[in-house]
Image (cartoon, grey):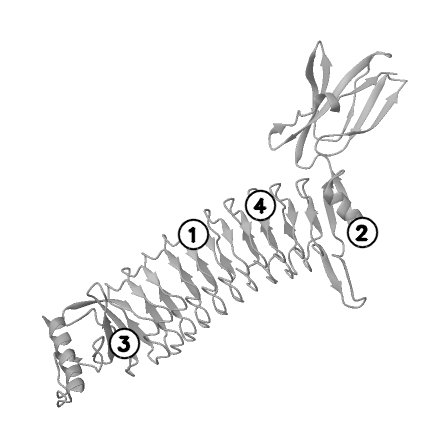
Amino acid sequence: MVNTNKKIAAGLLALTFVFGGAALPTGVVSNNTVISASAEELTYGNFTYTMLEDGTIEISKYTGSETAVEIPSEIDGVAVTSIGKRAFYCTSFKRVIMPYGITNIGDEAFDDSNNLVEVTIPDSVVNLGDFVFMGCDSLEHVVLSKNLTSISQGAFRDCEKLTSVTIPYGVTVVGDYAFEFCPCLESVELPNSITSIGYSAFGYGTSLKNINIPEGTSIIGEDAFRYCAMSEVVIPDSVTRIERSAFYSCKNLKSVYLPDGLTYLGDHVFCYCSNLESINIPKSLSTLPVYAFYETGIIDIAIPESVTTIGKNAFHYYDREKKVYSPIPDLTISCYSGSYAEQYAIENGINYKLIYKYPEVTDIDYSTTYHQFRLSWTPVEGADKYGIAAFIAGKWRVQTYTDKTTFTSPKLKAGDTYKLLIAARVNGEWDLSNINSRAFTVTVK
C-alpha cells in the first residue's frame, strides 16, 4: 500500500543519518508525492499534509502562489478530511475550492488571507475552528455548511467587505466575536435553532440594519450588537438574559420590545442609544441596572411594581456645561403609587405620573334638586371600558358600562344608600380583585 511504502521510505532515510550511509536520492513515490525530511510530514504539489490517527489526511500548509486554489479530495487514494491550524494563513489567492468530504477546518486556517473574495464551505464540514477567516479583508461572499452546529469564536472577525450572511438551520450558537468589526455587514439571517448570541458576536457592525433574533434564543451576550445600525429590535419571549452593553451606542435604535420572561438586564445595556424613544419594561424584571438608559431619547417610560432596584444614572445624561449628571430632559416615569419607581422619581427630581391598577374614585358630587350623584375616577392604563356595579340582594350586579371616567346616576330617592364598585376591562378581562376593599357607598341627597 502507498501509506506503508511512504513510512518504509521515510524510515530508510532516517537510518542513513544514524549509520552514516549515503542518503537516498530524492525520489517521487507517486506523481506528486515527495518524501519529506520528517516521517510525519509529507508534501503533495504545493500542499504539506500529515496523516491523522483515523488514517485520513489533514492539509497542514499551502506554499503555492496561484490565484485560485483547489484543495484535493484525496491524495494517493487517501481521503482529505481536515484543514489544519493556520494551513492557509496569510495566503494570497482569491478563491478556494474545498471538496466535499472535509469535516474539519482548523483554528485560523485562512486567517489574514487578504485577497480571498469568496468561500463555499461544503456541507460535509461539521466544525469551524476559532478565528478561521479572521482578517480576510476582501471576503465578500460566504456559503456556510448546512451541518454546522455553531459559528466559532472570531470566525469572520475583521472581514471588512462581508455584506450579508445566512446562517443555516442547526446552528445553535453564534460564538464570541464571530462577526465583530465587519463594517459592511448589512443583514444577517439567523435560524430558529439559535439559542445564544455570544460576546460581541456582531459588535461594531456599523452597517448592520437588519437582523432577526429568533424565537428560541435565550441569551444575548455582552456587547453582542454594540455600535450596530438597526432602528428597531424585537426580542422574542424566549430571551431571559441580555448581558452588559448588548446594544451599547446603537444610535439609530428607536424602539425595543422586551419580552415578559426577561429576568436580567446587564449594565449599560442601552447606554448611548441617543434616538431610543420607546421601550417597555416587563413585570419579570426586578432590577434596572446602572447606566441602562444613559443618554437615550426616552421621554416616557412605564416601570412596573416588580422593579425594586434602579442603578446609578440609569435615566441620566452628562450635562457638559454644568459638568454634572442630570435626569434625561422631559422624561416622565409612569409608576404605581407607593412603588420603588415613584420613590426613585421623587429622589432624582424626575417627573412622574401614577398608574392605577383599578379605578379609584376621586370625586362624588350630589344634586339635592334632582336626587342624583356623579362619580369621577382615575383612568386605568389599557382599559377600554368601565363597569359600574351595585351590590343588590347579596350579589354584585352591573348597572351600566361606559368608556369614560365619569358616571351620572338616574334620579333616585333621597336617603337611599347604595354600595357600588367600578371595574375596568383590560385586554378583554375584567379586574375584580380586592372587591370588598374597593367598594364604596353613596347616600342619595
Report the Cα–Cα distance between label 3 and label 1.
Answer: 33 Å
Q: Which residue is mark 4?
A: 263
Tell me where residue 203 appears, x and y as whole percent. Answer: 52, 64
Q: Is the N terminus in the top left, top right, bottom left or bottom right quadrant?
A: bottom left
Sequence-first disc among 2 and 1: 1
- The amino acid sitting under disc 4 is Thr
Tell which of 4 and 408 is nearer to you: 4
Please state if 193 lies on the left or on the right of 76 as rendered. right
Q: What is the quadrant of the C terminus in the image?
A: top right
Secondary-structure class at tag 1: loop
* Residue 323 image position (x, y, % from top left): 79, 67
Disc 4 crowd rating (10 Å Cα; few below 14, some 14-19, many 20+) is some
Q: As displayed, is residue 424 above or below residue 283?
A: above
**Residue 167 x/y as whole percent:** 39, 58
Badge 1 vs badge 4, beta-carbon distance below 8 Å: no
Mark 1–mark 4 Cα distance, whole angstroms, equals 19 Å
Does residue 332 appear left or right of residue 187 in this picture?
right
